[in-house]
Image: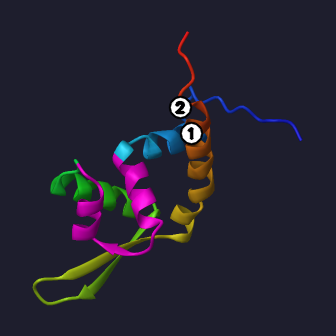
Amino acid sequence: MSLVIPDVLEETCSTRQALERLGSKWRILLIYGLLAGPQRHSELRRRIPGITQKMLTETLRGMETDGLVRREVLKESTPQHIEYSLTALGKTLQEPLAAICTWATANLNQPTR
C-alpha cells in the first residue's frame, strides 16, 4: 500500500478541511479533556487553564456542529446542568493525537538547525 499525499493546498481537500477544523489549540485540548469521559462546562474550564468562558462555549458549540462533541442537558430547570462528551467520531481522534504525543516526546529535545 502506498502513502497517499493529499493536496492540502486545495480548498476542497478533505484533509485541509479537517486540519482547519482541528487547528485550534482549544479544540485539541478539549478533545484531550473529554477523552477522560463526560464533563460539565465548569470542569472543562478548570482543567484547561487560559480558556475563557466565552471561548470554551464557542469552541464546544463548533465541535458539536462538527459532530465531535455531544451536549446533554441533565437538568432543565435553572441552573441547568449540561454535560459534554465525545461522540464516536470525536473518539476516533484519540489514536492520531496519541501519535502526535509520541512524536513530540521523541523529538522534544532535538537540536534546531
Q: Amino acid at mark 1?
A: Thr
How crowded is the residue under tag 1: few (<14 C-alpha within 10 Å), some, or many (20+)?
Answer: few
Which disc is residue 14 wearing?
A: none
Residues shaded magenta: 26-49
- Name the foreground residue: 91 vs 110: 110
Pointer 2 residue? 108
Q: Amino acid at mark 2?
A: Leu
Residue 110 higher or lower than 72, as above or below: above
Residue at left offset 39%, top offset 52%: 29
Which disc is residue 105 wearing?
A: 1
As measured in the structure, the alpha-carbon distance from the residue carrying label 1 to the one carrying label 2 is 5 Å
Q: Residue furthest left?
A: 78
Count the marks: 2
Callout 1 secondary element:
helix
The quarter holding residue 59 reads bottom left
Residue 58 higher or lower than 110, as above or below: below
Q: Position of residue 18 (x, y in %)?
A: 52, 45
* Quadrant, the C terminus: top right
